Structures are given as C-alpha cells and as structure tokens.
Image: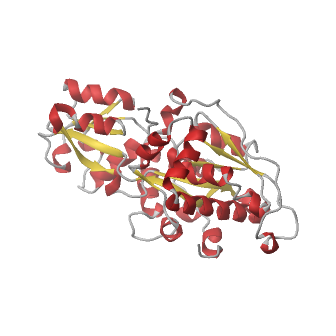
Amino acid sequence: MVLIPRSRYWLRRLLRKPAAFAFGTALLLGAGAASLPARALEPLTVGVVIWTGYGPFYVADALGFWKQRKLKVRLQVFADPALIPPAMAGRAVDGGVITYDQVLGADAKGQQLAVVLPVDYSDGGDAIVAATSIRSLADFKGERIAFNALSPSDFLLSYALSTQGLSEKDIVSADMTPEAIPSALVSGRVRIGVTYEPFVSQLTAQGGGKAFRVIYSSHDAPGLIADVLAFDRQQIAAHPAEIRALLEGYFDGLAYMKQNPQKAAQIMAKFMGISAGEVLAQMHGMHNPDRTEMLVNLSRSSAKTSFASSGEVIGRILKAKGQISQVPAFEQTVDDEFLRTLAPR
C-alpha cells in the first residue's frame, strides 16, 4: 500500500503528478447566484501540494461548488511546499495552503501572510516512538533522540519536552531524515525517534508489538502541526468576495466528505493518483476541523488548538535556530473575519 507521509518535505519523492498543473474549468451560473455580488468574481489560483488533508479542496473543485458561486478556482500543485510562499510573493498564485510554521517564517521576513482558514492538523499521525525501556517523557533527559530538524517533528519534540520542563539542551539531538529514523531505532543507535505514518505503525509492530511504543503524539498536541489557507494582506484587501466564495465552497466540500466518505475518497483518489482505500487509510491520524474548531484555532486562548499557543513553540524554535530574528505577533498572522462572518453551515 502506498502511503503519502504527513511531512510535506518528502512529497517530491512520492508524487505521481507533475510538479504543477491546473484544475478548474470555465464557469457557469449556479444556483444561489442571487445572493452573490453583482460584479463578476475574479479567478483565484491557490497553491497546494498532494495531501489527504486537502480533500475538501479537491472535492469542491470536482463537484463544482465554486462554480455555483461564480468563482473560478485553479488549484496549482507544487512538489515542494517551500515553493508556495515565494510564488505568492511573486503573484504566481493568489494564495496557498501551507503549514503554519511557514506563515510564521514568511511574516517574520516581511511577507505579511495571514491565515484565513485552518485546513487540517495532525491528530496522531506524527509521534515520538521509543524503546519500551523508556517509560515516560521524563526519561528523555540525557537521551540521544533522532528527528528531522526544523520540521514538524522538531516542533512536536520541543512541545513534548516543554510539558516536562525540559528543552533541547537536556537531550542529545540527532538530526536525521524521517525515513532514516526507523532503522536507527531498530539497530539500537538511538532509543527514541520522532517520525510519522507509516513509519510509526511499522515501528510499533516490531517484535510483535513489544519493541517500541508511542510515548507522545500529535494527538496530545492538537493544532501544533497544522495546514492552513493563507493569503497576503494585500490580496485579502483586494479580493474579499473571492476569498469568501472560496471558503464557502470549501465548507461544502468538507460537508460532502463527512456525509459521503466513500464517494469523497474516490474523488480524492483521482486527484491524488492513489486508490480510494489508500485515501481512507491516510485519513486516520489527521483531522479537518469544523468552523467552530477553526475559530478556536484563530483565537488567542489557552486552548491547545489555538495557533497562538503552538505559534509560541514554533516561533521559539525558528528563532533559536537562526531562521528568523523576531517572532511575529500572533494577530499579525491570522485573519478570522471571513470565518466569523460566514453564514453558519
């Protein structure tokens, strides 16, 4: 079975599609047009990668949910998510679906991106796996731990350590690619590693399930590893009606996925180039939040799913590693106006 890893840093090795292509067709007038603005909506191009969590976009495109709102949407697929913020800056795309850490990094460098829609977050698909001799997070002190630096694995480990009053200074860091970590654990070179599916399941199955176990996962830190739809502030100011219609179609796609999971999986499979069964398997370990959850994501609150909380962790890591000089203010990185004013769905 082919599984597309959660970490987008390795997608270029797994994509079955060209590096970039367009989806979308000429628009027809749809039902519900009477409630739309009188002026014609301008087309939007949105940068994406191939990832199961983006299913509502694929479904909305295939079923014409944007057509019904007189909006033409072009989903441009990139092999590497790191290319999307530069493409947004150069106006090659209008917006993009990227990870929240990318928004922080871009904003710290003056790009002025804002999250208008939380799309998905890892819910157990990323995990810290340890030999069964490791009993708890408190046992991590002094241990050599394998993880991919400046990746979601890095953020997850840092967050987990912080819950025990520990930091990266209390461990011995071993920077490895995600696919190298299972062999490092199995060979005994490290007793703890941070990775994602399908590697997590492969490791916990070793030795009849008695060799390794999950100590901490993204399920324990909801919202930390998150994909978001972002636009820069100028685009938000210039295209509010288009962005609103884009989000409305997205929510229709999300509702369809929940009501018709099998049919939605077939639609997603066609877009992704894998089987419907593989799509359904990949849905485990990630979560598409609903509108209520999204509003929490974009609020400054003590909730674990608030990006204000996860952003502090991510920003601290990026700054400590010299990737940014200053962590942008949370309010600078989000725009909840569209979500707050959309009609309940």
The quarter of the displayed image where residue 241 is located: bottom right
Residue visible at 16% across and 35% down in the picture? 208
Residue visible at 87% across and 62% down in the picture? 40
Q: Residue 8: x percent and y percent?
A: 50, 38
Residue visible at 58% across and 62% down in the picture? 334
Q: How many numbered marks, from 0 up?
A: 0
Q: Residue 321: x percent and y percent?
A: 44, 40
Position of residue 212 in the picture relative to residue 120 (left or right): left
Q: Residue 105: x percent and y percent?
A: 55, 47
Q: Is residue 170 above or below residue 63?
A: above
The quarter of the displayed image where residue 151 is located: top left
Q: Is residue 161 visible?
A: yes
Q: Is residue 259 above or below residue 92?
A: below
Q: Is residue 38 above or below residue 159?
A: below
Residue visible at 38% across and 42% down in the picture? 153
The front one of 67 and 225 is 67
The front one of 289 and 144 is 289
User: Which image quarter holds the C terminus?
Assistant: bottom right
Q: Residue 74: x percent and y percent?
A: 73, 46
The front one of 207 and 298 is 207
The front one of 134 and 196 is 196
User: Which image quarter holds the N terminus?
Assistant: top left
Position of residue 261 in the picture relative to residue 31 (left or right): left
The quarter of the displayed image where residue 143 is located: top left
Q: Is residue 326 visible?
A: no
Position of residue 30 in the picture relative to residue 192 (left or right): right
Colour scheme? secondary structure
Q: Residue furthest right?
A: 39
